[in-house]
Image: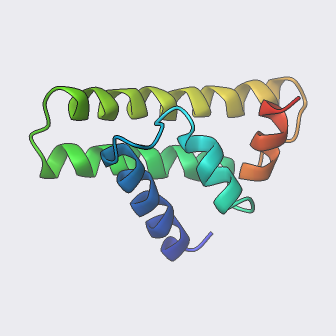
Amino acid sequence: MSCSFLAHMTDAAALAVLDSEQSVTDLPAVLARQWPAAPALEMVLAISSACDAIEGMYQLQGEGAARVQQAWRIAALVGAQVYAAQKLGQPHDTAADLLAFWNR
């Protein structure tokens, strides 16, 4: 993926984390559906980069801070799921592969 796709994915992740109307838990599936050809680990980088940028720009407290921490955990979980899919011999290279892994 080119850096421009990563930038768009990172922006989408940041907007989702900052929007209390959106589910942070659903963020990986939302990103995967929007960018199915993206490398699976690019979602981890996008979510992590979004969290880092948010923490650098805002002094969030309360719900906002909790959403950022939840997104950090979600990014780590996606990374672990990529590894699990690999160890299980499942396709794991793209976001679409992860969607299929999650839906099995």
The quarter in which the C terminus is drawn is top right
Residue at 90%, 30% (x, y): give it. Answer: 89
Q: Position of residue 61 (x, y in %)?
A: 13, 30
Q: Is residue 64 left or right of residue 93?
A: left
Residue 94 visible from this viewpoint:
no
Question: Above or below — where is 94 with respect to 21?
Answer: below
Residue in the picture at 74% in, 24% down: 84
Q: Nearer the viewer, residue 16 or 93?
A: 16
Is residue 49 toward the left or the right of residue 100 in the image?
left
Q: Residue at x 9, y 40 (%)?
A: 59
Q: How is the image coloured?
A: rainbow
Instruction: Estimate the x, y position of residue 7 in percent, counting from the top left.
Output: 44, 68
Query: Would residue 24 be found to the left or right of residue 64 on screen?
Result: right
Q: Quadrant of the N terminus?
A: bottom right
Residue 38 appears in view = yes
Estimate the x, y position of residue 86 in percent, counting from the top left: 80, 32
- Which residue is painted at 77% across and 48% down in the image? 93
Which percent across, then down, holds residue 30?
61, 49
**Hey, which residue is sitting farthest front in the picture?**
21
Q: Quadrant of residue 103?
A: top right
